[in-house]
Image (tube, rainbow, N blue to C red):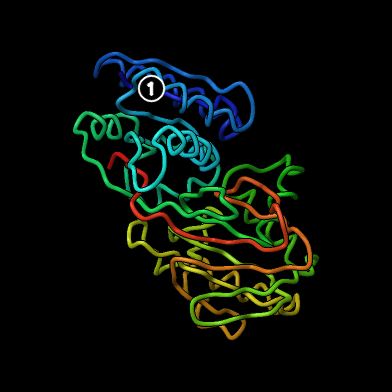
Amino acid sequence: MIALIVNPAAGRGAAQARAASAEQALRALGPLRRYDTRAAGDERRCARAACDDGATVVAVVGGDGSVHHTVRGLLEAAGPAPAHTIPLAVYAAGTGNDLVKSLSTPAHDVRAMTERVARGVTRHLDVGCIDDVPFVNAAGLGFDVEVLERMQHQRWLSGTAAYVVTALRALFGYAGYHASLVTPHTRQDGPHLLTVFANGHTFGGTFRIAPHARLDDGMLACVNVRAVSPLQRPGVFLRAVRGTHLAHASVTHDTGATFTIVSPAPLPFEADGERYRSRGAEIHIRVEPRRLTVIT
């Protein structure tokens, strides 16, 4: 049985039409059961229910947030590492759709993606964890969380344009966050403008934040930007669009399987664009190699 999870609100409603096309195409492959979300983050419940109902493939129509919560449900159903999940197919219908840029699947083409489901070719991806919250593409602290909070009030733009415009407006007002970042090779004390732990290479819809990141190498890429003056910030972020920012004097980067952030108090963070707050002042970041099975 194929399970189809649909977030009707994804992409500001764009998922509705994509879901109808995906449902029609997938039904031609065999039995299908559709699960519509009822609230934000409900994909997690839907994924667990689909696994309990005997799904052999879980397809999700939505953006990075929908994928994030679906993966949380799949991981819970699979049990402890190193168990693999039921295969996941992604039909992109969100704002940034960052994960599929690293996956290089035809996630925007319903017919082509359904052909991939029919073929059943899979790949095992690493899953990152920040404060025990799993993420597939990236997690971050600082500036990206500030942008996400401002995005809640964005009414006139959507998609990548909304993120880019909101980020540019926030560049001059965000002061940074204070913490110590411990990577496998360095310890960096704040203030920091942005810290990203990347499994995929794209972030925020358009930024190649970690051009060297790989989804299945058992490592996370950590990219940290110091809280430089507002006038220096546009240069860093413009370089990030091309992925050339790693050479900037304010940017450091490292790779590893574990990282730690120690702050005076709990910090807000995001995982795949979903906002959270740490449980304590010390945040641990780690990777679980090849945990997620995806249709490619």
In the shown orientation, is residue 213 left or right of residue 171? left
SS class, disc 1: strand
Is 82 positioned to the left or the right of 145 in the image? left
What is the quadrant of the C terminus in the image? Answer: top left
Number of labels in the image equals: 1
Which residue is nearer to you in this view: 215 or 229? 215
Residue 287 drawn at (x, y percent): 44, 58
Q: Residue furthest bottom?
A: 249
Say what amino acid the circle numbered 1 marks.
Ala
List the single residue furthest toward the left: 119
Image quadrant containing the N terminus: top left
Q: Nearer the viewer, residue 279 or 69?
A: 279
Residue lying at 58% horizontally and 70% vertically, measured from the top left: 238
Above or below: residue 245 compared with residue 291:
below
Question: Residue at horizontal 62%, vertical 42%?
Answer: 158
Residue at coordinates 31% horizontally, 21% vertically from top-left? 26
Above/below status of 165 relative to 80: below
Left or right: 104, with 133 as reference point: left
Residue 189 in the image: above or below residue 92: below
Which of these two is toward me, 147 or 131?
131
Residue that protrudes farthest toward the front in the picture: 80
* Residue at horizontal 51 percent and vertical 28 percent from the top: 15
Label 1 Cα crowd, 10 Å radius (few <14 / some 14-19 / many 20+): many
Can you give x and y, in whole percent of width and height, for residue 142 in the image? Answer: 69, 63
- Residue 245 on image: x %, y %: 52, 76
Residue receiving disc 1:
3
